[in-house]
Image (cartoon, rainbow, N blue to C red):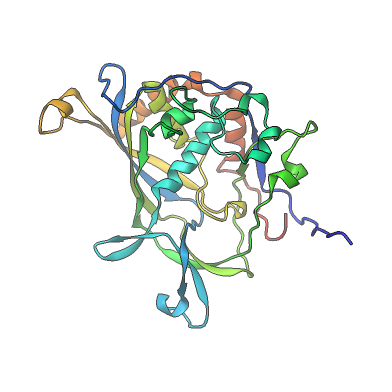
């Protein structure tokens, strides 16, 4: 007797950004020297304001009584770091980097960094090869690949203000692309890169307990970059959502419309020639309206790297004004 799958009660909370028709590869600037006349190095200081509840698991559990709650149950702990001896909520730099890289891969002629071997036969020809050596796609040139250091690094984003809460997190099961007709087209080819739609979160009465950071909370982090062309810096700014045409989703619970964040640049520190020649640094620090204008200009310079069809799909899926209720049952 075959296994009968539970019928979905809700529409799928995700959609696909189609693959691009080609893959661009070139040799990027490396770390071996600073190319002061051709590239930019420095730091972007950002604040991250949570638009919905955010849970990033630490991989451990805490007893409810240890958190000052009624004893008798365990809570899935969220990621924290020590600051002045006190554990405070944070967003790992790796989480933010992964979210930005996935976005940049989707809107440029970039490769898929990691695909199980049994799925490669379902990829279009444009995605059939991964980067390596000195020939890198736009995403790998920024975020690194086999044999190539990343030229962008993300610090943990540390808690600035807000609060946390305990909520019920229902079981979420990973759909296996090789088994789901939802992931392939009529030619048995993968439809594209999967992104979860934004929507209106719903409260759940079932599932395990987990700790999360409340909507409205603010965190702050740094993004360092080395030897980026102005267009690449614009691509990084776009991937962060600094053009305000979409908002990223981070952490767990994305099918439930959790983890939507608004990222804002607070400072752009650009290293000047004096930074390399004198003990005292000579960084140019951009902020306020000057920073807003500079970010817009860099994003404009990235336009040739952005693909229109994919760009439209990303903005539709990650539209922060989406009023779709998040599923509360099977989908």
Q: Which residue of the protein is positioned furthest toward the left in this rendering?
A: 279
Would you say 62 lies left or right of 30 here?
A: right
Q: Position of residue 57 (x, y in %)?
A: 48, 60
Camera-side residue of 28 and 275: 28
Residue drawn at x 43%, y 35% as measured from the top left: 242
State the image quarter where residue 122 is shown.
top right
Image: 158 above or below 153: below
Residue at 64% across, 70% down: 206
Q: Is residue 68 above or below residue 86?
A: below
Task: Where is residue 304? Give x, y as percent.
Answer: 49, 18
Please indicate whether residue 69 sits to the left or right of residue 278 in the image.
right
Q: Quadrant of the C terminus?
A: bottom right
Instruction: Kindly identify the residue that appears in the image at 58 percent across and 27 percent down.
Output: 129
> Residue 102, how many percent across, how many down?
52, 38
The residue most toward the right is: 1
Q: How many marks?
A: 0
Q: Quadrant of residue 148?
A: top left
Quarter of the picture holding the N terminus: bottom right
The residue positioned farthest toward the bottom in the image shown:
71
Q: Name the spot of residue 21 as percent of width and height, x first.
A: 64, 22
Q: Is residue 66 above or below residue 274?
A: below
**Residue 105 placement, left or right of 13:** left
| Up-down relation of residue 298 to residue 57 (above or below) | above
Can residue 96 be seen here? The reply is: yes
Residue depicted at x 57% and y 40% = 318
Q: Is residue 237 visible?
A: no
């Amino acid at each position: 007797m075959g296994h009968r799958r539970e019928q979905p009660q809700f529409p799928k909370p995700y959609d696909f950004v189609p693959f691009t028709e080609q893959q661009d590869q070139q040799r990027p600037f490396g770390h071996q020297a600073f190319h002061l006349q051709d590239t930019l190095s420095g730091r972007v200081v950002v604040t991250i304001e949570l638009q919905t509840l955010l849970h990033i698991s630490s991989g451990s559990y805490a007893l409810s009584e240890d958190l000052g709650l009624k004893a008798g149950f365990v809570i899935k702990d969220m990621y924290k770091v020590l600051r002045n001896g006190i554990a405070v909520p944070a967003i790992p730099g790796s989480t933010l980097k992964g979210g930005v890289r996935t976005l940049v891969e989707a809107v440029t002629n970039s490769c898929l960094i990691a695909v199980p071997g049994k799925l490669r036969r379902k990829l279009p020809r444009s995605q059939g090869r991964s980067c390596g050596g000195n020939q890198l796609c736009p995403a790998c040139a920024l975020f690194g690949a086999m044999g190539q250091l990343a030229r962008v690094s993300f610090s943990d984003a540390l808690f600035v203000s807000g609060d946390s809460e305990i909520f019920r997190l229902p079981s979420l099961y990973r759909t296996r692309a090789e088994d789901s007709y939802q992931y392939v087209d009529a030619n048995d080819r993968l439809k594209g890169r999967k992104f979860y739609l934004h929507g209106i979160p719903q409260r759940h009465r079932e599932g395990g307990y987990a700790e999360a950071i409340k909507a409205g909370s603010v965190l702050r982090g740094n993004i360092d970059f080395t030897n980026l062309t102005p267009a690449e810096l614009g691509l990084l700014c776009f991937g962060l959502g600094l053009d305000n045409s979409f908002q990223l989703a981070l952490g767990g619970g994305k099918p439930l419309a959790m983890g939507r964040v608004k990222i804002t640049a607070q400072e752009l520190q650009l290293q000047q020639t004096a930074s390399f020649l004198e003990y005292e640094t000579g960084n140019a620090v951009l902020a306020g309206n000057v920073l807003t204008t500079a970010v817009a200009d860099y994003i404009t310079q990235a336009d040739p790297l952005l693909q229109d069809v994919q760009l439209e799909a990303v903005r539709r899926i990650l539209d922060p004004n989406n009023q779709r209720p998040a599923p509360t049952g099977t989908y």
